Amino acid sequence: MAVPEAPRGFGPGVRKVLGEHDLDGLAVDGGIELLRVNPAELALAVLHQRAPDTGPLLDEVDRLLWLANVPPAPEVIATGRSDGGDETVVLALGRDAVSAEHGHPMGPEALASSLATALSDLHARPAQHCPFTADAATLRRVVDQRIDAGAVTDVDDGPYAGRDAGSLAAIFDQLTADLGPPDDPVFIHAGLAAKRLWLDPAGGLTLLGWRWAGVGDRHLDLAAAAAMLTSLYGPALVGPFIESYGFDRVDLRRLDAHQILAHLLA
């Protein structure tokens, strides 16, 4: 007999915002449940993680509060902890926003252009006093955890097809050792994927999934964006995307290396 799922626990501040409205489950990402408040006219989304393993959501909330509601981060409406230890954050999300898994409402070129603009703005954010690190060493620890958990998918094509996750990690280590640290570290999202990118027909772009974000190499976000565009529409959009972001800010050797890291984190 199936065991009924335990009810979600919300803190009092979150309950006040949500009221008696229904919640529709959309996805689960790394243990964090994404919910949409119904009716959609309320333009709210909810991230919820059950106790006791609430570290990923707490990491995400810390970064969202540091980002201070500046796009492409969503506006934080409320946060709260239930009596049982569940963690929740309520976010603003346009009522007509859709995941990029379905493409851009305005078409492929609109996605490439808006994504380039959003990443350019994010990478230009002052980060000298940022308390969060997303350098190669920090993210490699995340990769090791994912490999141990069997969370990394196999590569089906390209130059690294047929190699297991451990071999790919070793290749990335060698490439980054040869390249050294970036000359211009910036604040990066570090977990870009279609399921974490939400698009509003009115032109807004919102990123979720900030738990690994911090100061690191811009080429990780660019590599993840290129992989996402290729998966959705084919490789033809990668050139226009990089051009829109700015060829002068891109090192192709670093972009190639970070394609491996982007895959290991995807």
Image: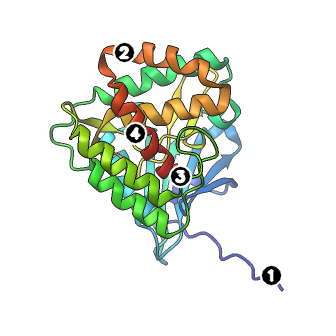
Q: Earlier in the sequence, mark 3 or mark 2?
A: 3
What distance separates the C-alpha of mark 4 from that of mark 2?
17 Å
Which residue is under mark 4?
258
What distance separates the C-alpha of mark 3 from that of mark 2?
41 Å
Find residue 2 and name its label: 1
Nearer to me, 232 or 263: 263
Q: Earlier in the sequence, mark 1 or mark 3?
A: 1
Image colouring: rainbow
What distance separates the C-alpha of mark 1 from that of mark 3?
32 Å
Q: Position of residue 238 (x, y in %)?
A: 53, 21
Q: Contact (CB < 8 A) between labels 2 and 1?
A: no
Q: Contact (CB < 8 A) between labels 4 and 2?
A: no
> Is 54 left or right of 141, judged from the image as shown?
right
Residue type highlighted by circle 1? Ala
Q: Position of residue 64 (x, y in %)?
A: 37, 46
Which corner quadrant of the image does residue 116 belong to? top left
For label 1, the SS is: loop
Q: Position of residue 34 (x, y in %)?
A: 60, 53
What distance separates the C-alpha of mark 3 from that of mark 4?
40 Å
Q: Quadrant of the N terminus?
A: bottom right
Dot 3 alpha-carbon crowd within 10 angstroms: few under 14, some 14 to 19, many 20 or more: some
Q: Earlier in the sequence, mark 3 or mark 4?
A: 3
Residue type highlighted by circle 2? Gly
Dot 2 alpha-carbon crowd within 10 angstroms: few under 14, some 14 to 19, many 20 or more: few
What distance separates the C-alpha of mark 1 from that of mark 4?
43 Å
Which residue is under mark 3?
17
Which residue is under mark 2?
246
Residue type highlighted by circle 4? His
The residue sitting at 37% across, 15% down in the picture is: 246
For label 2, the SS is: loop
